[in-house]
Amino acid sequence: MLKLLCPLIDKQEKKPLAFPATVVWHTERDSRSSKLLHVKPQKKHLADGDYAFSPAPDLLRIERKGSLVELTHNLFSDDYARFARALDRLIPYPHKYLLIDC
């Protein structure tokens, strides 16, 4: 069973999210099936998105915006084309998310 959760953080993230040292993972509704996971974030070059999770980085990607102001700027400025390309690169991943850190 997985006992280590490794968030992968893109090296270009200016202010990475803070992750707790441990999390409780519930595999079923029965609380007896919960597992304590140790969290070990790692900085890594990610070609797509800002965050992924090891041991399966090709399953999920997260594109993070640091604020609503940043998201608004990306949507309504000359930066839109770059932002749209960044989102397009997430299409192949089965699970993709846009995280707005407010």
Image (tube, rainbow, N blue to C red):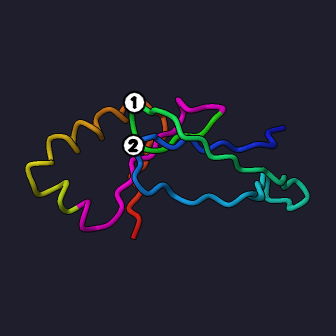
Residue bearing the label numbered 2 = 12
Q: Amino acid at mark 1?
A: Ala
Label 1, residues with CA under 10 Å away: few <14, some 14-19, many ≥20:
few
Q: Amino acid at mark 2?
A: Gln
Q: Position of residue 83 (x, y in %)?
A: 23, 45
Q: Residue at x 62, y 58 (%)?
A: 19
- The residue furthest right is 32
In the rendered image, residue 98, in percent from the top left (x then y), is placed at 38, 52
Q: Position of residue 80 (x, y in %)?
A: 15, 47
Q: Secondary structure at mark 2?
A: loop
Q: Is residue 41 above or below residue 26?
A: above
Magenta highlight range: 55-71
Is residue 47 placed above or below 5 in the rendered structure?
Answer: above
Q: Quadrant of the N terminus?
A: top right
- For this rendering, which residue is in front, 88 or 3? 3
Please identify the residue farthest to the left as the structure is shown: 78
Closer-to-camera residue (42/55): 42
Residue 84, image quadrant: top left
